[in-house]
Structures are given as C-alpha cells and as structure tokens.
Image: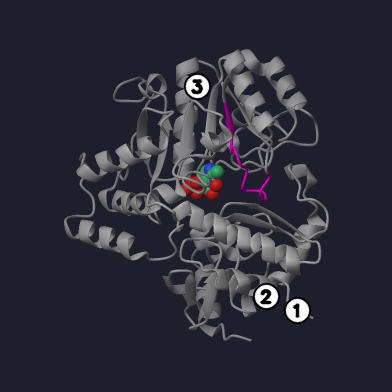
Amino acid sequence: MPSLKTSEALFERARGLMPGGVSSPVRAFGKVGGVPRYVSKAQGPWLWDEDGNRLLDFCLAWGPNILGHAHPAVVEAVTSTARDGLAFGTPHRNEVALAELVLEAFPEHQLVRFVVSGTEAVATAMRLARGVTGRPLTLKFTGCYHGHVDSLLVKAGSGVVTQGLSDSKGVPEGLAATTVVVPLDDEAAMAAAFEQYGPRLAAAIVEPLPANNGLLLQRKAWLEALRAQCTKHGTVLIFDEVINGFRFHFGGYGRLMGVTPDLTTLGKIVGGGLPVAAVVGKRELLSDLAPLGAVYQAGTMAGNPVALAAGLATLTELRRPGTYEGLEALGARLEARWKQRSRGMGLRRVGSLFWPWLDASLPPTTAEAISPEVAARFHQSYARWLDEGVYLPPSAYEVGFLSTAHTPAHVDRLIDVLFPEA
Ligand SMILES: Cc1ncc(COP(=O)(O)O)c(C=O)c1O
C-alpha cells in the first residue's frame, strides 16, 4: 500500500478551510472514497503526489491536456509570454493568432469571443440566443452537462417532456422553468418538445457526443433530426464542444457528423491547460454581442495573454500531421486489449475518449439507462486501481482521456490493472 500521509494531512487541513476541502466537487473522491491525492508535479502521462507516489494519469485534468502534462512547447510559450507581462487588459497579438486558428478549425463559423471557463461560454451563448431571437426558453437533454449555468442545472424526470426542476438549491424556480428537458436518443420526445414549446425556444443546447454522464454516443440521424427541428422552429442550435472540440480532429465533433450548429462552445483543449474558453459562431449571431450589438458580455481575464499562449501552442502542436491518427491508434489498441481481457465487459470509445462500462450489457445511450449497480462496481474497484498506480477519473460517470504522451505500453498497463490475469 502506498503511503498517503502527506495527502491525508493536507486533506484534513483543507476540509477546515474549503467546502469539502476542494475547489470543485468531484475532486473530493465522494463516490470512490478514500483520500484524494495531492499532486505536486505532472509530466507527460504521469502525476506525482505529495508522498512521492507516481500515477499513470487517464484523467488529464479532465480533458485539456491532450498533449500530456507540461508539454515542452506549451510550457515554453507560457513562460516566455509571462516574462513580458501576465495580463494587459488590452487587445494583443496572441488573441488574433488564436482566433485565426480556432476559425480555421471551425470553418462553419466566422467570429469567436474568448472567455475564461466553459460555464461562461455556455452562459454567453445562451444569452446571445435569447437576445437574437427574443425568446425565453432553452431545450436541453438529460445527462448533458453544460457547466453550472443556473438555468441548466436541470435534468429530466422520467416523463417524456419535463419542464425544468432544478437539481441545485439556489436556482429560482422561474429560472429553472426556462429550461425544457428531454431524453437523448429519442426523436419522438424531441419532436413533442418542439411541438409544444417551439415558438418560445431560443436555443437547443447539446453535447453532440455527450461525455459527462458516461459516453452516451448518439446516432447521426438523431443529431440531424435536432438540426432540422431547430431550423424549422427558428431555434438557435448550440453544440457544447467543451470536451469534444479538438479532441477527435482539428475541429468539432459536429463537423465529423456532418451536422452544423449555429453556435459552438469550446473550453478545455482550446486553453491547453490554462483557463480559456470560447463562443464560436455565425457572423450574424456573434455580431449581436457587445460592443457590436446589444447582448452584453465582458471579462477582466478574458483573452489573458498567458492563457492564450498555452492554447495557441497546444493547437499548433495538434495541427501537425499524424497527431490525431496517433491518438486513434492508441484508442484502437485500448479497445482491442479491452476485448481480449475484459471477459465481455463493455467499453465505449471514440478516438482518445473512453468510458469503462463494467458490465456485459451494451453501454447505454441515455442517462436514464445507466445502472447504479454497474457504476457501483467501478467505484468499488477504484481504490485498488489507484493503489496500483492508475489514475482514472474518480467517478463511474466520467470519461477517461488518452493523450499524445501515452504509449501503447501505458494502455497495456491500464488493461493489466483493470483486468489482472488470473
Ligand atoms: C460539455 C461541457 N460544457 C461545459 C462545461 C463547463 O466548463 P467549465 O468547467 O470550464 O466551466 C464542461 C465541464 O466539464 C463540459 O464538459
């Protein structure tokens, strides 16, 4: 058993200082139990905790580190930019360069606004949709997470169409009620929602590959149906690509599916490990944002030069030929080795994103179909995996990430730990 003395002592102190001892809830290890590791250093695919234990990381800061931790080109860009000043509060060169790269990656869009977090990107996109259409409501899908935007902290009950009831205290009823929630993977429920609320729906927001409640792969036809409904009803379609964007190719998942949204939200990879997010979209929509239009949005730290330097360096690396082919090959190896060793348990995998489904049944496509027993199996095994040096996200409902810093040997190690040979 690895020694965890320092992590234990720090967690004890932290619990007296911060709610749950953490800055973001899932880091408290509530589902898997035990003490969260206090990380002191990270390099490539590795984390080191304060007690000197080394962990093979498949969480990767929840997605931004697609190049692995502390990639030399990103660290160099950040440090050299920082030497010239940490924040200007003015326009600057990196902003123009990153905007050009993002719009190259999303040729369906013409303008981008940089913000600081995925939550802020979604809040901005929603306000913009409401401002442009003059309508009050948003359609969302059960199991999709869009940050902690008040009105989106809502999921469906078991009914076909549910007018939102908030999952979080502190959200006024009236605000939650501006969200209409329907299940994924169900064209009839979607059509019924548009039928009932269509003329009042400003936006429909979806993770085109939902990755916050397992990996709930949707059919292309379902995404096409959503696009068609939005077009028919004059509703702004927002693809929340905070996880998906730049993950599978140099662009969005929507383009891979051949379905074009009106607005796209980005985060995680676009900041390469520092706080950058973005709203990307059609010129006629983003032209309604201040200072051009009457939809207000602003930020002291928006477009921070050091943060944008990390994003710029990351996207520059990702754009090199062969990057995504390499990530796909790693993912394919994980899938092949999983099949050999898992004795029939499921794995949902798209490119370098994977979701262990510790059951012989097919991985589900809706949040409602995720069985708590299967999730419990993951949570019960987690401590052993960690003791053996493998760091997966500490919840069965989160996805795992591969990076360009992982090798086939790292993937094999993951399989050996998950499925030890008898
Ligand atoms: C799809 C999606 N949207 C929005 C967010 C919120 O982003 P942030 O945590 O940067 O506020 C997340 C975070 O995981 C996300 O996965």
Q: Amino acid at mark 2?
A: Asp
Q: Amino acid at mark 1?
A: Glu
Q: Which residues are magenta?
A: 204-216
Residue at image point 59% right, 68% down: 411
When asked about the image quadrant of residue 237, the answer is top right
When asked about the image quadrant of residue 220, the answer is top right
The residue that disc 3 covers is 130
User: What kind of element bears circle 3?
Assistant: helix
Q: Residues within 10 Å of mark 1 (few under 14, many from 20)?
A: few
Residue at image point 60% right, 33% down: 172
Query: Which of the labelled discs sits on residue 317, or is there none?
Result: none
What secondary structure characterizes most of the magenta part? loop
Extreme residue in the left direction: 84
When asked about the image quadrant of residue 395, the answer is bottom right
Residue at image point 78% right, 65% down: 377
Q: Residues within 10 Å of mark 2 (few under 14, many from 20)?
A: some
Q: Is 120 a magenta residue? A: no
Question: Is there CB contact under 8 Å for labels 1 and 2?
Answer: yes
Query: Which of the labelled discs sits on residue 421, or is there none?
Result: 1
Q: Residues within 10 Å of mark 3 (few under 14, many from 20)?
A: many
Task: Choose the circle earlier in sequence order: 1 or 2.
Answer: 2
Alpha carbon separation for disc pair 1 and 2: 7 Å
The answer to whether 129 is drawn above or below residue 95 in the figure is above
The residue that disc 2 covers is 416
10 or 201: nearer the viewer: 201
**Is residue 23 something one can see in this rendering?**
no
